[in-house]
Amino acid sequence: MRGRKYIVDASVAVKWFIPEDYSEIALRILEGFKDLRITLYAPDSMKLEFINAIRKYYIRGIITGDLMNSILEEMRKIPINYVEIDWELVVEALKIAVKNNITVYDAYYIATSQKHNIQVVTADEKFYNTIAKKYNVILLKNFKI
């Protein structure tokens, strides 16, 4: 049985493949997942957010097309517990988004977190600073594993 549970957003998953600030912490989360110390969840929408972020690195010339495709294949092999998008949570995410002036995509992580009582891990400081006092979210740079 796996230990602690977390919802990871795309900003964390990108750091598994692209060396950036706090990538080493993101990689420790992934390692904890692989050795069964933690369980990772994400809404299905994270798949699109993740690959769109990787696409941006390709467009900017930071990575090659071959590397972009390789990253996609490697990400597909990571057995994150993806939570299906459902209309009940979409409605809740819209309320959270409007109330906090954040995207519905970001708010969906919060709605999923609330429904399943699982903390969200994000590397997005702007998102974190907007919602940290109201919701169960931890900033990647503060994450301890």
Image (tube, rainbow, N blue to C red):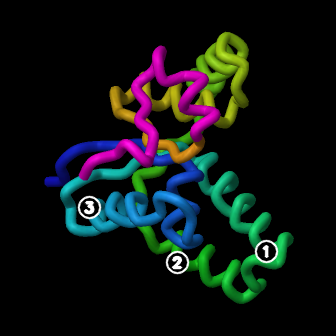
Q: Which residue is mark 3?
A: 32
Relative image position of residue 101 (x, y in whole percent): 72, 19
The one nearer the camera, 21 or 3, is: 21
Q: Residue at x 67, y 36 (%)?
A: 105
Is residue 61 shown above or below 54? below
The one nearer the camera, 86 or 92, is: 92
Q: Name the quadrant of the N terminus.
A: bottom left
Relative to 117, is 17 on the left or the right?
right
Type of amino acid at the residue the image marks with label 3: Gly
Sooner in the amino-acid sequence: mark 2 or mark 1: 1
Relative image position of residue 18 (x, y in whole percent): 58, 71
* Residue 79 seen by the camera: no
Read off the magenta span: 125-145
Sooner in the amino-acid sequence: mark 3 or mark 2: 3
Q: Which residue is mark 1?
A: 58
The disc placed on residue 74 is 2
Badge 1 crowding class, 10 Å Cα cut-off, few under 14, some 14 to 19, many 20 or more, is: some
Residue farthest to the right, as pictured: 59
